[in-house]
Image: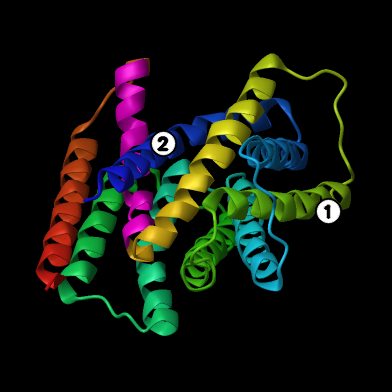
Amino acid sequence: MNPHISSAYLTLILVWSTTALGIKWAVMGLPFSLALLGRFGLAALLALSVLAWRRQSLPLQRGDLRVYVIAGSASALSMLGTFWAAQYISSGMVAVVYGLIPLATAMFSRWILKTPLQTLEYLAIAVGFAGLVVIFGQKLSLTPDGFYGLGALLLSAIVQSGAAVLLKVHAQGQSPVAVNAGALTIGTAICALIWWLSGAPLIDALPLRSAAAVVYLASLGSVLAFSLYYWLIRECRPISVALISLITPVTSLWLGNVLNHEAFHRDELIGTGLILFGLLIYGLAVHHKKP
């Protein structure tokens, strides 16, 4: 694998493994819609500043605007669904449902890109998903309202998967930093509308931890991570990027074990082994596909 792609892949895994805690800290001290607007608004300003620093302008041709709308709408709406669903369902359910993203991406790739997966690739997705179920199986519980949350979460995963494949079609040759800046600008407008429709809530005092979380999510979670994400979509098959959603729940657990001395149980070890085995199968499938 190209070393630049490997570095981008590992950086994205590391950043997205830490964003769950950042989201939790952000919404603990801020209204959900205000935290979402703060993240997108600050991220858009930072991304546009990066463009200015690089002396790049934001392309505004029709094709560019279409890419910004696809990426920005998908990012804002999938995050909205995830934040809203998290009120009603467990974090384990969130991880398992997002583990379906590689399968959904495969379906969209087959439909839009006309690139069906091999049997080994489907097997890799199934084994990796089984690993997530083993890890989070004890946490899969639903309240009566949880079914609505589950529906919102499934829609979020589908939106994210479909957008990744559409970007593979429409964003070829475009700067990932420009795509991210345009997408975050569109996302900010959507989040502002959501904030206004939810009553435009404000706070009297901004908790330091929530403020730090929003800054982290905006700078690393959005500006850095999504620029890398759009670059990887441009350079790789969408399904290869989608497999990150199988890895980040496990790396989050391992980071908690290493940095926060959280207990690690047998199911988590078995599940991690299954996910790694699934990734090995996928690697063999890709190697087998090469001429």
In terms of secondary structure, where does tag 2 sit? Answer: helix
Nearer to me, 181 or 116: 181
**Image point (16%, 57%), residue name:** 283
Tell me: residue 24, above or below residue 62: above
Camera sees residue 138: no
Magenta span: 240-259
Q: In which quadrant will I find the C terminus?
A: bottom left
**Image point (14%, 66%), residue name:** 285
Q: Which mark is residue 193?
A: 1
Q: Nearer the N terminus, badge 1 or badge 2?
A: 2
Query: Dot 1, crowdedness within 10 Å: few (<14), some or many (≥20)?
Result: some
Question: Magenta span: helix, strand or loop, mainly?
Answer: helix
Does residue 208 belong to the magenta stretch?
Answer: no
In the displayed structure image, the side of residue 6 where residue 39 appears, left or right: right
**Image point (30%, 19%), residue name:** 258
Instruction: Identify residue type, mark 1.
Output: Leu
Residue 201 image position (x, y, % from top left): 86, 37
Tell me: residue 57, above or below residue 37: below
For this orientation, the residue located farthest to the front is 55
Q: CA distance from mark 1 to mark 2?
A: 29 Å
Residue 51 image position (x, y, % from top left): 65, 42
**Image point (34%, 45%), residue name:** 9
Per the image, the residue denoted by label 2 is 17
Tell me: residue 192, above or below residue 120: above
Does residue 245 belong to the magenta stretch?
Answer: yes
In the displayed structure image, the side of residue 284 where residue 70 appears, left or right: right
Residue 6 image position (x, y, % from top left): 28, 44
Query: Dot 2, crowdedness within 10 Å: few (<14), some or many (≥20)?
Result: many
Instruction: Identify residue type, mark 2.
Output: Ser
